[in-house]
Amino acid sequence: MPRLRVIVLAQEANNSLTYNVIYWADVPSARQTFYANASATSVWPGATATDIQNLQNGSVVEQGQTLAFQPGTGLAQIETILQREWQNYQTYITNFNPWVHYGSTWDGTTWTITSNP
């Protein structure tokens, strides 16, 4: 599980209700090799060595988003929306599996079908 889930990076200079954020999501263990990237890093300079290692080994994945809120939106509402957006991202990472049959082969006669959960 990532150490943090939502990280607010900045507010736009010309609109204090526009936030740049990143989300860190937990990758199912069976798919971590597909997300692994030895050169991966975080856009957030506050990421620890362990955070970076988790991004590199594929156990955690990072995504950025810019969200614009309406005038009058309170901090509590913004926090709730960011939590919901993180949950949407985590659900996507957990459920989306484009590698379900990765490595399946056909030798000209027989198919060998793999199943990657």
Image (cartoon, rainbow, N blue to C red):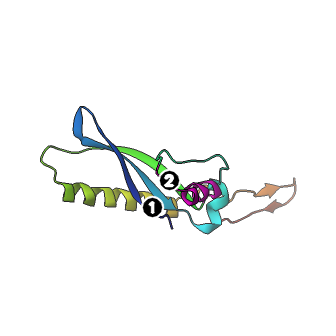
Query: Visible in this render: residue 117?
Result: no
Q: Residue at x 22, y 36 (%)?
A: 15
Residue 60 visible within the image: yes
Q: Is residue 112 magenta?
A: no
Q: Amino acid at mark 2?
A: Ala
- Residue 50's image quarter? bottom right
62, 98: nearer the viewer: 62
| Three-letter amino acid code at the position of disc 1 | Gln
96 on left or right of 66: right
SS of the residue at dot 1?
A: helix
Q: Residue at x 52, y 48 (%)?
A: 42
Residue 35 figure quarter = bottom right
Location of the C terminus (image quadrant): bottom right
Q: Residue 69: which disc? A: none
Locate residue 88, reporting x and y percent. Answer: 39, 59
Q: Which residue is mark 2?
A: 47
Mark 2, secondary structure of its residue: loop
| Residues drawn in magenta | 46-58
Is disc 1 in contact with disc 2, using a CB cutoff of under 8 Å? no
Q: Mark 1 against mark 2, which lies toward the viewer? A: 2
Picture residue at 73% right of the left edge, 64% below the top: 114
The answer to which of 97 and 36 lies nearer the viewer is 36
Pointer 1 or 2: first along the chain: 2
21 to the left or right of 68:
right
Percent x, y of residue 51? 54, 58
- In the image, taking residue 6 as reference, residue 36 lies left or right, namely right
